């Protein structure tokens, strides 16, 4: 059965598709999209392409003006995935641009999670006589800005833990087997999750043993800098010939030595990080879960018995229930994705 959407929901879907173009490109800002409609006809659309650049609303207005004239937005409706900003930062307030363009109606998915701004944009618009509708596809909008919302409300980044395991719960294979547990299709799938994040973190043991590159490649690397690569360790004696210290992206490498995990995560926020991909071994994963710092889990489950001696979680007593579980087949593997409430 096809999902039945209201007209507002249909256009908000289009705005969310615009916002998705900026996922992973806008930090420390959130990804935002906007679509302008009048009498059921689309006039323009836009998305926020990076911090310091024009916001989605301004880009959509420019697009409509270029296609239909400077007065085209008067008495139209603009669909925006996030409450328009009401303060002057690196760019002017979007509510000013909306009022200047003469919109009759503004439709919003998510409320600004910034405690200093929440609701202010709505108030300014309503005082000027603009009709404001909120909460249209709010869950989808909230998921789009979940990295930003976590940082704004807690001072910590959103943490995605990514790992791969065999059916017997092992993260290494037996002697003589390949180092790869997951399939090539799953390893390629990881690229789209890495692209969303501003930093990738591994523990010192994973760094020493695996010598990872932790880079974006191919189309996933287009249009954005490589993520920061973070080694979280208590060991000063790290191999200086490994990729993270010698490759062309070595300036993106950070060593967080003898910090608490919270100190490490907060220091990344200070560098403009909204989202962190934790690609560590089991010890750091268990530590992060125990402290409650993991927000989302992506597990690639390979259809094999591994026989290795490294467990997914090498300590006992850690329990968790994942919410909103998604199960997707990726090549021969199964990708499990869920959220920690």
Image (tube, rainbow, N blue to C red):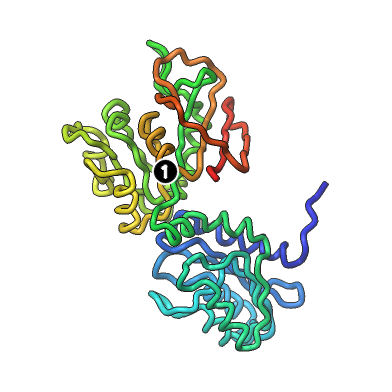
For the point 39% across and 58% down, the residue is 155
Image position of 85 with respect to 192: above or below:
below
Q: Foreground residue, 279 or 293?
A: 293
Residue found at the very far right of the displayed protein = 1
- Quadrant location of residue 75? bottom right
For the C terminus, give its image quadrant. top right
For the point 50% across and 61% down, the residue is 31
Image position of 38 with respect to 200: above or below:
below
Report which residue position mark 1 lands on: 277
Image position of 270 with respect to 159: above or below:
below
Residue found at the very far top of the displayed protein = 175
Give residue 240's position: percent from left, percent from top.
Answer: 18, 34
Horizontal placement of 182 versus 68: left or right?
A: left
Q: Residues within 10 Å of mark 1 (few under 14, many from 20)?
A: many
Give residue 295's position: percent from left, percent from top.
Answer: 48, 45
Horizontal placement of 247 versus 156: left or right?
A: left
Give residue 6's position: percent from left, percent from top.
Answer: 77, 63
For the image, the number of numbered tags is 1
Q: Foreground residue, 180 or 281?
A: 281
For the point 43% across and 38% down, the residue is 289
**SS at badge 1:** strand
For the point 46% across and 36% down, the residue is 162
Give residue 248's position: percent from left, percent from top.
Answer: 26, 44
């Amino acid at each position: 059965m096809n999902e039945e959407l209201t007209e507002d929901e249909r256009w908000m879907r289009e705005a969310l598709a615009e916002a998705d173009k900026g996922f992973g490109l806008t930090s420390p800002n959130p990804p935002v999209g906007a679509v302008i409609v009048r009498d059921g006809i689309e006039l323009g659309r836009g998305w926020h392409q990076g911090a310091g650049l024009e916001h989605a609303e301004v880009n959509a207005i420019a697009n409509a003006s270029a296609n239909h004239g400077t007065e085209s937005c008067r008495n139209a409706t603009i669909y925006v995935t996030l409450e328009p900003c009401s303060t002057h930062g690196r760019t002017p307030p979007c509510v000013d641009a909306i009022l200047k363009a003469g919109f009759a109606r503004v439709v919003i998915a998510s409320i600004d999670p910034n405690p200093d701004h929440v609701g202010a944009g709505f108030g300014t618009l309503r005082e000027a006589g603009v009709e404001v509708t909120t909460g249209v596809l709010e869950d989808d909008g909230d998921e789009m800005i979940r990295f930003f919302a976590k940082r704004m409300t807690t001072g910590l980044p959103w943490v995605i833990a990514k790992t791969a395991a065999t059916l017997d719960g092992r993260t290494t294979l037996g002697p003589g087997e390949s180092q790869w547990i997951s399939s090539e299709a799953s390893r390629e799938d990881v690229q789209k999750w890495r692209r969303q994040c501003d930093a990738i973190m591994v523990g010192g043991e994973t760094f020493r043993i695996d010598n990872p590159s932790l880079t974006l490649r191919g189309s996933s690397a287009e249009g954005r800098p490589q993520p920061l690569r973070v080694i979280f360790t208590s060991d000063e004696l790290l191999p200086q010939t490994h990729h993270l210290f010698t490759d062309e992206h070595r300036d993106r490498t950070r060593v967080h030595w003898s910090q608490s995990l919270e100190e490490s995560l907060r220091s990344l926020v200070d560098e403009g990080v909204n989202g962190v991909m934790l690609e560590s071994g089991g010890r750091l994963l268990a530590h992060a879960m125990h402290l409650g710092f993991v927000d989302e889990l992506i597990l690639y489950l390979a259809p094999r018995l591994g026989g290795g001696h490294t467990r997914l979680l090498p300590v006992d007593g850690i329990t968790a229930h994942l919410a909103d579980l998604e199960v997707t087949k990726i090549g021969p593997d199964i990708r499990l994705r869920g959220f920690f409430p």
